[in-house]
Amino acid sequence: MARRPLVVIGSGLAGLTCAWASDPQGCILLTAGVLTDGAASMWAQGGIAAALSPDDSTALHAEDTWRAGAFAGDRAVIDRITGVAPEVVRLLVELEVPFDRAPDGSIDLALEGGHSRSRVAHAGDHSGAAVTTAMARAVRAAPHVEVREHHTVTRLLADASGAVCGVEVRRRDGSLEVIETDRVVLATGGMGGLWAHTTNPTTALGQGVALAARVGARTDDLHLVQFHPTALDVAADPMPLLTEALRGAGAKLVSDGARFVDELQPRDVVAAAVWEQLTEGRTVRLDARGINRVATRFPAVAELTAASGLDLTRDLLPVRPALHYSMGGVTVDDTGRSSVPGLWAVGEVSRTGLHGANRLASNSLLEAVVTGRAAAADAITWTGVWRGSVRPADPATVRTRTCTAAPAASRPLPLAQVRETLDSACGVLRDGPTLQAAVDCLEPHVGDDAAYVAWLIARSALAHPLSVGAHRRTDNVLPEGVSA
């Protein structure tokens, strides 16, 4: 009997990499729109971190990642992923990613917050689009990948033993189809669209977390989400992002005209400092006017500021923290295996242990490529015996769509209310009573995916009373640098 197909869900960088690396066996790649639509990796401005210069090393990259994550990451995972970063950049060069070059022809390396060396390979200030587009081009040309666009996965199917046995898909015409498979790779991206203030696509609603959790997959660290400190504070949803590389190039943060923070500290530190100024009634702006040729070096930023009526070369830019990245997600091992047999997760939907409590800038594209390749290698050779190392999920987190925890379950909570609830309860600063109120508000509505994931996030934040990295509790705070 022919083997059932490998199914990859999502066409951001992680999903594309997994599909491309599934050669020679191949896969079906499902994406809700056309290839790369709604992928946060297309929006990444900074680049991909790798120790490529003579004064750098993978050990230093690992140490910076460990420190930026508030010493809460998995050190073995950190060492493994940063250790292959130079190889990943070489692979992307082979795929014709147009990285910027120094005068001597070497890859130009930028400095970003939390890094002790200049190590970010970039393609202008649209690196994510350059990398993801190159991988999409490779996938389009790959005969072993069947791309099915306008196919939205509505649920995963599991057999009596709890193993994956299929996916239910809604096609463009609204009809439903079941694809029988015993191997699924989730590459659905993050959940930043669940916050009212976000730099993510508003379609990033944690769909992968919902799909996995409903079939019993373990999730961890959902409360560990990163707030980018310099989202452009204008009337836009999502909020335009002012890349970390601006501060690496010399842009300064000022509050009522005075500088108040070292701009190159890890993002959680800078975001908290900005938030403190804002809550005290001050106005925070980013001053990039002193950067030489700033509009030429950062054309995408110049374009987005101009769209808001601001001039990058002349104006002080109003900023505020906004939800940017999810460090937690579906818990996986080194091969991407979850706690559910036949289910892998890669990229931002996964919790690998690389990022700890705060992602180091420009490590996300790296993680997407590394985890996508690892899951593909494991999935195409898997023989049916699931020896994953991930512990089972807490049964209290597993809720089906038909769950009726309360009569209100039949009335989905409006998405706008879900977003406002998470924004107020799970923002830069959190406290127990507000989190409990959010859990109580969301729980009757867990039959709806957006409310379900928001409930899981708020529940996770409530269960962690100690501050660590990007998770800052005002009612039980540890000293700076101490991990929970």
Image (cartoon, rainbow, N blue to C red):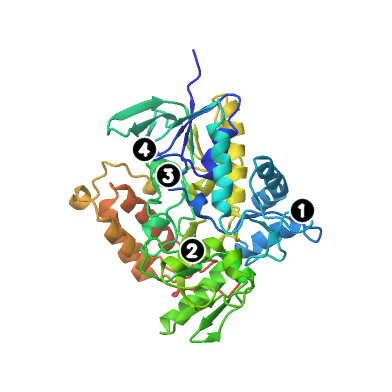
Residue type, numbered disc 1: Gly
Q: Residue furthest top?
A: 1
Residue type, numbered disc 3: Gly
Residue at mark 2 to residue at mark 3: CA–CA distance: 32 Å
Residue at mark 2 to residue at mark 4: CA–CA distance: 32 Å
Residue type, numbered disc 2: Glu
Q: What secondary structure is found at the residue carrying circle 1?
A: loop
Could you tell me residue 470's position as x and y percent?
A: 51, 66
Could you tell me residue 289's position as x and y percent?
A: 57, 77
Q: What secondary structure is found at the residue carrying circle 4?
A: strand
Residue at mark 1 to residue at mark 4: CA–CA distance: 43 Å
Compared to residue 74, the image places residue 248 above or below, namely below
| For discs 4 and 3, the disc positioned in front in the rendered view | 4
Compared to residue 389, the image places residue 290 above or below, namely below
Tell me, yes or no, whether the two marked residues, 2 and 1, touch with CB atoms within 8 Å. no
| For discs 2 and 3, the disc positioned in front in the rendered view | 2
Left or right: where 187 falls relative to 121: left
Residue at mark 2 to residue at mark 1: CA–CA distance: 28 Å
| Residue in the picture at 70% in, 57% down | 62
The answer to whether residue 208 of the structure is visible from this angle is yes
Residue annotated with mark 3 = 208
The quarter of the rendered structure image containing the C terminus is: bottom right
